[in-house]
Amino acid sequence: MLLEKMLQSQGFGSRKYCQQLIKSGAVQIHGELIDNLKYKVNLDQLAFQVYGQNYVYREKVYIALHKPKGYECSHQATHHFSVFEFFDDALMNRGLQCVGRLDQDTTGLLLLTDDGQFLQALTHPKKHVPKVYEMYTADDVTDAQLQQLELGVELRNENGIFAATEAMRLAEKQLRFTVHQGVYHQVKRMVAAVGNKVEQLHRAQIGQLGLEQLNHLAEGEWVYLTEAQIELAKQRAE
């Protein structure tokens, strides 16, 4: 692939701008300065630098972010910060999107990608990718509430029954369960439907990928997913 096309595919700007980067001596391939516009790169394990910053060629990007409280999953955040503020212009130019959303007051695992097929595989209702949530509630969690969550509840303006799996009480006012759909405010509405209220909400896992497989990312930190981690995120429980 022509060097300028590779740079453009990685979000560095227009073709003309990428040509200017090359001609100005801003680009190095494996430590060698390249200023030839006709230079072709081997994409296999390609490492390069732009203005001294290290990059690795990625056909698509798959990112895990430990989302902090106070950030919206929106490009046009209105009342809070945007999760996209964690990423540089090159990533944003690739069309980075959230794989599902978390409310601004919800913390935890958030995936982002520029791969439409991956996004669809994790968010389409028919895929039923499990998501594990942990929460603190306003009132003590009762046995009856746990049972009702597992049997399923109806949610206003939604079709069907919404049931939790693997529901467990971690403390008097602390609850953990798995959901397999992804409707608006689902977890909060399910807890409200059994007579309690979510005070704090945290997503611990998507598919079979949890924060523990990501070296326990601190809030506000992000990493590129490995191929194995990408597959874990798509897996349903056996």
Image (spheres, grey):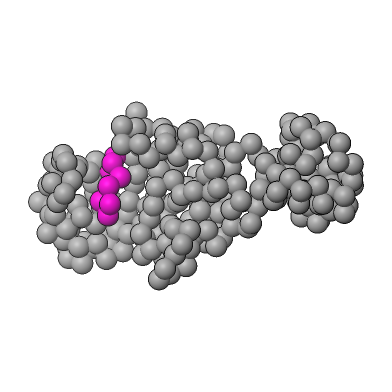
Q: Which residue lies furthest to the top in this view?
A: 238
Quadrant where the C terminus sits is top left
Q: Can residue 14 be seen in this view?
A: yes
Q: Where is residue 210 in the image (x, y as percent from the top left)?
A: 44, 45
Query: Is 152 one of the magenta-colored residues?
Result: no
Boundaries of the magenta span: 177-186
Residue 95 is situated, as x and y percent measured from the top left of the image, at 55, 48
Of residues 165 and 155, the one drawn nearer to the viewer in this rendering: 155
Q: How many callouts does the rendering have?
A: 0
Query: Quarter of the image holding residue 165?
Result: top left
Observer-nearest residue: 195 or 42? 42
Q: Quadrant of the N terminus?
A: top right
In the image, is 107 to the left or to the right of 48? left
Residue 171 visible from this viewpoint: no
Q: Mainly helix, strand or loop, the magenta region?
A: loop
Task: Pinpoint residue 82: horizontal percent, then vertical percent.
Answer: 48, 63
Query: Which residue is farthest bottom?
Result: 79
Q: Residue, x 87% and y 50% (percent of image)?
A: 23
**Place of residue 232 in the rendered image (x, y in percent of width and height, measured from the top left):** 46, 35
In-image side of 128 versus 216 (left or right): left
Q: Who is closer to the viewer here, 186 or 137?
A: 186
Name the residue rendered at 27%, 47% in the picture: 183
Residue 178 part of the magenta segment? yes
- Direction front: furthest residue: 16
The residue that appears at 56% across and 54% down in the rendered structure is 222
Vertical placement of residue 209 versus 201, above or below: above
